[in-house]
């Protein structure tokens, strides 16, 4: 970024209970076949609390139960893998054995929200990514040597350096990075410097070439399991650094009819939706989260996102949740032994802007993307609800977005993490009790390290009544759930 300004939190005015009751924010909205009691939305966040096999744990139940205490209109459960493959402590739904845990998760949300919160499951596919290798190991084992490597080494270092494959490998391993940039292809250098990562353009790999034939059924089967588990709907994850977002990206240049043009890039996302809808029917909500702007060189922009939104609305999606950035393409180089993380570069900042930002600041920074998509969707005659997010943190800000017709639903991840009760506190006229997010991305830093995600503000409540008994992080240093709200006796409101 060209300039770095530390922005203060915006002044916040909180409504009385009567004003909240009259507000747009706390009015109901239909998401296709279901109705949410308010336009308040907790988007998907990955807390790293599942088992290594993707099963629901007590920590997972406590995490979502705590958000349900705040009674948002919608709670979206974290990105959940549709394949039955190892993926670390992330939830999965690629087999029937996951159903029991997911049913219990839904039950906890319903109980803790007194039936007020609609619960959706975000489902996704992702491609292989590996950790950045040690230099010697990469050139000894991972780089596939071709004649061009031998020729390049021979021309630069002499015949002896290219006498055989082992000589070529040893010579390359001795080169500095500037020299390697000249001797390797851009993709080879990226695999060396950042770690191997599959792309949807890798048509030489049979499993990548076959994604259009495989993914519709995988998503449809996952959605059917979500329905069986009791969820109100699914959010198809078409955003950020994952497979479906890569199909929508301008960087998708597949020549098999599934890339190379807007129509080609939309083809698989639409086929996935139609497969899901055919499997779950029309009384189960199906929407998508996708990008209004990729914020990467050669990536999709708002004009692409508008066209995608129009196609999705015409196809029958029940909601469209708009995000921004969060791509591998501009991620910071990881340390050796670590994997690239898609929220460390400029596109990552745009996805989760902090108080240290440019002159535009972080608050409501991405609303204009949702507004442009909504305007086009409405002009085309579609009533599809549009969800916006990104630094939305107080009542007047949210209400203004809705009043201006920039979005239909307000999503807040980090503010909801800081205080899961904030929606309920607002609605009951207790805004003064809200613990306000300070937007430093402490939580995102933990996610980057694959540590259990918490909020730095939680442990500042030293007098919390559960301080001695609350579950702690694996290192014992952090609370795993937010302190309870104890300012009032909670009634039925």
Image: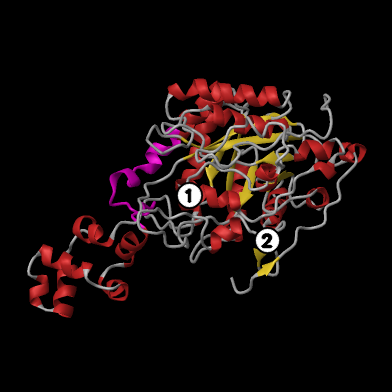
Judged left or right of residue 338, residue 413 is: right
| Label 2 environment density (alpha carbons within 10 Å; few <14, some 14–19, many ≥20) | some
Residue 458, can we see it? yes
The first of marks 2 and 1 along the sequence is 2
Q: Residue at x 17, y 70 (%)?
A: 171
Residue 252 drawn at (x, y percent): 43, 56
Residue 105 shown in magenta:
no
The residue under the point 31% across, 61% down is 192
Q: Nearer the viewer, residue 281 or 10?
A: 10
Split into 4 quadrants, where in the image is the N terminus? bottom right
Figure disc tally: 2
Tell me, what colour scheme is on the image? secondary structure
Is residue 285 shown to the viewer in this render? Answer: no
Specify the segment rendered in magenta.
Answer: 195-218
Residue at point 67%, 38% (across, down): 482
209 or 243: nearer the eye? 243
| SS at badge 2 | loop
Residue 163, image x, y percentages: 7, 70
Image quadrant in which you'd find residue 180: bottom left
Q: Which mark is residue 397?
A: none
Report helix, strand or loop for mark 1: loop
Residue 203 colored magenta? yes
User: Residue 355 bears which disc, if any?
Assistant: 2
Instruction: State the residue position of label 1.
Output: 449
96 sits left or right of 139 in the view: right
């Amino acid at each position: 970024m060209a300039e770095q300004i530390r922005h203060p939190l915006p002044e916040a005015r909180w409504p009385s209970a009567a004003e909240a009751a009259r507000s747009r924010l706390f009015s109901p909205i239909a998401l296709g076949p279901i109705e949410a009691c308010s336009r308040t939305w907790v988007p998907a966040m990955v807390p790293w609390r599942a088992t290594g096999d993707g099963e629901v744990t007590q920590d997972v139940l406590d995490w979502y139960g705590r958000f349900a205490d705040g009674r948002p209109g919608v709670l979206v459960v974290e990105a959940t893998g549709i394949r039955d493959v190892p993926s670390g402590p992330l939830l999965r739904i690629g087999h029937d054995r996951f159903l029991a845990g997911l049913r219990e998760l839904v039950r906890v949300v319903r109980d803790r929200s007194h039936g007020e919160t609609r619960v959706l499951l975000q489902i996704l596919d992702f491609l292989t990514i590996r950790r950045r290798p040690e230099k010697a190991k990469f050139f000894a084992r991972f780089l596939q040597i071709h004649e061009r490597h031998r020729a390049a080494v021979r021309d630069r270092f002499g015949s002896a350096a290219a006498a055989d494959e082992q000589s070529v490998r040893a010579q390359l391993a001795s080169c500095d990075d500037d020299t390697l940039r000249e001797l390797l292809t851009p993709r080879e250098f990226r695999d060396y410097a950042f770690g191997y990562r599959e792309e949807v353009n890798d048509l030489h790999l049979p499993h990548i070439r076959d994604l259009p034939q495989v993914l519709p059924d995988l998503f449809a089967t996952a959605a059917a399991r979500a329905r069986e588990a009791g969820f109100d709907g699914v959010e198809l994850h078409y955003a950020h650094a994952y497979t479906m977002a890569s199909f929508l990206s301008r960087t998708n240049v597949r020549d098999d009819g599934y890339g190379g043009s807007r129509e080609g890039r939309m083809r698989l996302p639409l086929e996935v939706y139609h497969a899901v809808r055919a499997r779950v029917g029309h009384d189960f909500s199906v929407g998508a989260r996708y990008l209004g702007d990729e914020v990467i060189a050669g990536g999709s922009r708002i004009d692409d996102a508008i066209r995608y939104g129009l196609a999705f609305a015409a196809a029958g999606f029940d909601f469209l949740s708009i995000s921004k950035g969060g791509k591998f393409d501009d991620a910071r180089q990881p340390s050796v032994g670590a994997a690239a993380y898609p929220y460390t570069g400029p596109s990552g900042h745009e996805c989760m802007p902090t108080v240290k930002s440019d002159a535009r600041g972080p608050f409501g920074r991405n609303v204009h993307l949702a507004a442009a998509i909504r305007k086009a969707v409405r002009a085309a005659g579609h009533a599809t609800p549009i969800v916006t997010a990104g630094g939305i943190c107080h009542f007047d800000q949210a209400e203004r977005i809705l009043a201006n017709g920039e979005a239909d639903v307000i999503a807040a991840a980090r503010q909801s993490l800081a205080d899961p009760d904030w929606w309920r506190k607002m609605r009951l006229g207790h805004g003064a009790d809200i613990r306000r997010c300070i937007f430093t991305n402490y939580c995102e830093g933990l996610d980057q390290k694959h540590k259990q995600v918490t909020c730095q503000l939680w442990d500042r409540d030293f007098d919390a009544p559960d301080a001695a008994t609350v579950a702690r992080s694996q290192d014992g240093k952090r609370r795993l759930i937010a302190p309870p709200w104890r300012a009032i006796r909670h009634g039925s409101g």
